Image (tube, grey):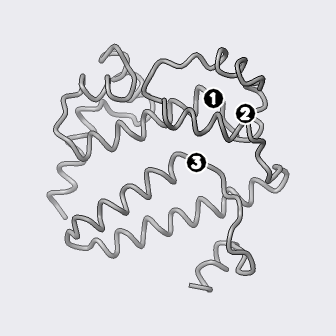
Amino acid sequence: MKNILTYHGIPLDRHVFYSGTLPEYKMLFRKIIRELQQCKYGYEDYIASMFNTILLLVSRQQQEGENVEINIPEEIEAAIAYFNENYNIKISVEDYAESLHISTRNFKRYMKISPAQYILSLRMVNAQSLLENTDYKIGEIAEIVGYDNQLYFSRVFRKEYGVSPAQYRKKMEKSSLSK
């Protein structure tokens, strides 16, 4: 383990350090948990691969974040928590920022993405998870993650992943059958 952490440039002398709050972390941890629950063929290797991806993302965040302040202001932390809990409802980022007396520019400075992009990525990660793990219809998934219009949801999903939600689901079903 020490060699792996050293390879990724993760300090061995600190037990806790800031690595960002990328939505990809959440998605990868969910996949790891699902693999541990299902114990399908090759799950140990798949989990090791996902864990390695997490370490690579942390390492990348550390490398790119050399000029970033480590202490995130409480109001940014509050915004992150609020967005994580309420990504699936209509959020006026400007109204929310104004109510907390923070600027969207400040959020972007710390998070490296705008609040709207952060919310979008939360929606897409959760849509991905629902497409992979449920039999909900595309319209139901669109509503669950905060879109009133299924067509608009499909356009946004296609823009993010290069395939429609239905194509993504089929692709995931085929890959799980081949495992």
Relative height, residue 101 to residue 41 (above, below)? above
- Element type where label 2 sits in the image: helix
Residue at the image position 48 percent from the left and 30 percent from the top: 87
x%, y% of residue 72?
Answer: 76, 46
Q: Disc number at residue 22?
A: 3
x%, y% of residue 7?
Answer: 64, 78
Q: What's the distance in space between the residues labelled 3 and 1, CA to CA?
A: 12 Å
- Element type where label 1 sits in the image: helix
Q: Quadrant of residue 124?
A: top left
Q: What's the distance in space between the residues labelled 1 and 2, CA to CA?
A: 7 Å
Tell me whether the residue at label 1 lies in contact with that at label 2, contact meaning CB atoms closer than 8 angstroms.
Answer: yes
Tell me whether the residue at label 3 lies in contact with that at label 1, contact meaning CB atoms closer than 8 angstroms.
Answer: no
Q: Is residue 91 left or right of residue 133?
A: right
Please, what is the three-letter code of the amino acid marked with disc 3?
Leu
Near-viewer residue (108 or 7): 108
Q: Is residue 79 left or right of residue 127?
A: right
Residue at the image position 68 percent from the left and 68 percent from the top: 16
